[in-house]
Image (tube, helix red, strand yellow):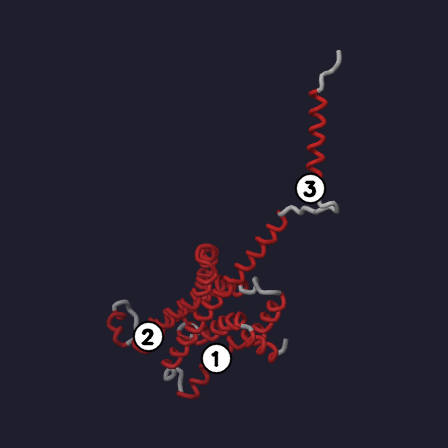
Amino acid sequence: MGTMESLKFLVSSKYIRDLATLVVAYGISINLFPSPNEYSSFMGDFSTATGIATFTMMLLSQFIFDKYGWGAAARITPTVLLLTGVGFFSLILFGDPLGPTLAKFGMTPLLAAVYVGAMQNIFSKSAKYSLFDPCKEMAYIPLDEDTKVKGKAAIDVVCNPLGKSGGALIQQFMILTFGSLASSTPYLGGILLVIVLAWLAAAKSLDTQFTALRQEEELEKEMERAAVKIPVVSETGNGTFAGGSLLNQSAGDSTGSTSETSTPSNI
């Protein structure tokens, strides 16, 4: 599918459109946060921490899917980004009153923001690998083959590149508009809030549709199993049932054998 065909398909299908919102929102949200390595060299073991967190989340993911279902698992990644984003931008914008308290722990508001930014990267990426990606792939399962193929192609062609480049484009636009990244920080926080809220709304909508499709699928399977178990009784030309004639024949044989047994023999 080409780009225009992908866009048309995204517009025509609400289910695929909600799924595309999840993909684009993650790509933009994760790229709105600067990498911790750009802030300070103390995050040299960032990849190790991400690997440990991802491994732990993968161990917990099966429990989350079994206990709370697809919808709860799909909401964990945007919730992590929302909470860490609020903490990060709050420390950047309103960190001065917290300065004396943070000084007791040997930190400044900026350093605390670096720690929160690092936590955001670690936990959001671990949630992506262990929950977001499985949720995205599971969302294709109840779709018919045509919608599944076209929807996946549309998301791969349009939404993945848009999500990956969207955060960087927003940052560049803000820098050109306001002169620096620091001056545009409040606006980046507002954009992140809008994107994550749209992400959560799309996840809720998709959960409703996903659950309905899975229930329909389960109902069809139950009907197919029930149809296999129902015996087929055919009617013969003289108006009697084939099953009944077999039963009558069996009953006649049984009666005949009983009569023969009960007849006294001549000595």
Q: Which mark is residue 222?
A: none
Q: Residue at x 41, y 79 (%)?
A: 191
**SS class of the residue under badge 2?**
helix
Q: In the figure, is residue 3 to the left or right of 163?
A: right
For the residues labelled 1 and 2, the Cα–Cα distance comes to: 21 Å
Q: CA distance from mark 3 to mark 2?
A: 79 Å
Q: Amino acid at mark 1?
A: Ala
Q: Amino acid at mark 3?
A: Gly
Badge 3: residue crowd in 10 Å (few <14, some 14–19, many ≥20): few
Q: Secondary structure at mark 3?
A: helix
Residue 168 - label: 1
The answer to whether residue 200 is above or below residue 165 is: above
Residue with the mark numbered 2: 90
- N-terminal of the pair, mark 1 or mark 3, is 1
Residue 187 appears in the picture as rendered: yes
The residue carrying mark 3 is 243
